[in-house]
Image (cartoon, helix red, strand yellow):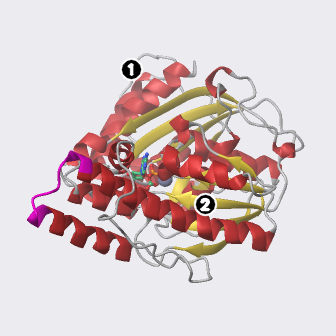
Amino acid sequence: MNILAIETSCDETALSIIQTNETNTENPNFSILSDLVISQIEVHAEYGGVFPALAKREHAKNLVPLFEQSLKNAGLYTKKQTESTEHPVVKEILDREPELYNDLMILISQITQPNIDMIMVTHGPGLAPALWVGVNFARALSELWNIPIVPVNHMEGHVTSILLKEKYLNEQNALLDIKTFHFPMLSLLISGGHTQLVLVKNWGDYEIIGETIDDAVGEAFDKVARMLGMEYPGGPKISLAAEKGQENQVINLPRPMISSGDYRFSLSGLKTAARYLIDDLKKEDSLDEQTIADTAYEFQNAVTEVLIKKTSKAIEEYGAKGLIIAGGVSANTFITKSFREKMNEYNAALYLPEKKLCGDNALMIATAGYINYWHNNKKATISQNELVAVSNLKL
Ligand code: KG4
Ligand code: ZN
């Protein structure tokens, strides 16, 4: 059985194809035939953030070439005598992505129907215009070749991304043995759009116990980076600058809501405090390289302390046996190293995604869809006309 996974919720266009030979719910696993991501970072950099209309346009432009390459990687690409194709229903589905329709029809006119048995696609949460491109692409393929669809929650993708093994690309069994995990676990999801503490009662069974009331962690990193003159996405640039920074007397930032006693986060106050601090430093003409590094260090440290305090409290309260940190910001090694040190105090294992899978990708969408479909035995597929994008979809 071959499964195509599609991810377009933000600024990465990603497709992967996985293959599973068994429908063994006890020991689910798959191998990876193709895994491709096109990042739009450069397109968005000059806007200082992801620009939804641009993201939509880029996804529409990228999807067919990426799909063609995915089929080639997976050995599912077979040329045929070209015959011109029109498809009124598919044209209707892709009414708002006419260029995607044209590209797709050209490809369809040149290849035989590939052996794809199921489509798993991110239908939320994310930027609505971006999500809809992937959703409509899935609907078009489903309509063309009569393939059932499994809608996937992007955040569940991040949670289950930790199941993918290090050398997964060469593995027959790309997934860790899910029987080795003990519940309940906690998941700290930190990305450009989300900051959530999630109680993981089992795979597929989640409860959000707290989230940010304003900015997401990645968003705060990106905004403070911009104040320090760094390009979007600023998260990685802050962490790089912070490596040369240190604590000092002058540069102090607050740890918002650190003692609030609940699991809510707030980052906009920290961002504002950083703005005042940076403005003052600029006025004094003292924003030199070392001061930038020290500010980056202090900001990263403030965020980390708040994340650790709240997560530790939740681990105790819920008796969590494991902690999953995922989402784009989980690529931050200062944060993950600090957590690793702290976790030694608890009897809880720490699970992180492979570096390559911290950002958005379609492999995690395949994993979440697969785990739900087989392990949880939900076996729920829908047809193309039932599929919609839900930008504020909850776990
Ligand atoms: O999960 P993701 O790829 O996309 C969303 O779904 O949001 O997360 C992207 C976010 C961006 O805000 C980016 O700056 C941040 O993750 N990020 C980092 C690091 N690498 C990526 N933030 C801090 N430190 C990093 N090393
Ligand atoms: Zn994400």
Image quarter where the C terminus lies is bottom right
Q: Which residues are magenta?
A: 282-290
Give the answer, above or below, for where 107 lies relative to 205.
above
Mark 2 and mark 1 in contact? Answer it, CB < 8 Å: no
x and y percent of residue 178 in the render? 81, 44
x and y percent of residue 293 in the render? 30, 49
Mark 1, residue position? 82
Q: Is mark 1 within 8 Å of ligand 1?
A: no
Q: Quadrant of residue 343?
A: bottom right
Q: Residue at x 73, y 66 (%)?
A: 315
Q: Which mark is residue 188?
A: 2
Say whether residue 146 is visible.
no
Question: In the image, 39: left or right of 44?
Answer: right
Q: Amino acid at mark 1?
A: Thr
Q: Residue furthest front?
A: 249
In primary-sequence order, the first of circles 2 and 1 is: 1
Q: Residues within 10 Å of mark 1 (few under 14, many from 20)?
A: few
Q: Amino acid at mark 2?
A: Leu
Question: In the image, 317: left or right of 85?
Answer: right
Q: Nearer the viewer, mark 2 or mark 1?
A: 2
Give the answer, above or below, for where 260 lies relative to 16.
below
Say whether residue 343 is visible.
yes
x and y percent of residue 273 in the render? 30, 73
Front in this rendered view, residue 175 or 76 = 175
Q: Residue at x 36, y 39 (%)?
A: 39
Q: Which mark is residue 265?
A: none
**Magenta region includes residue 43:** no
x and y percent of residue 160 in the render? 67, 49
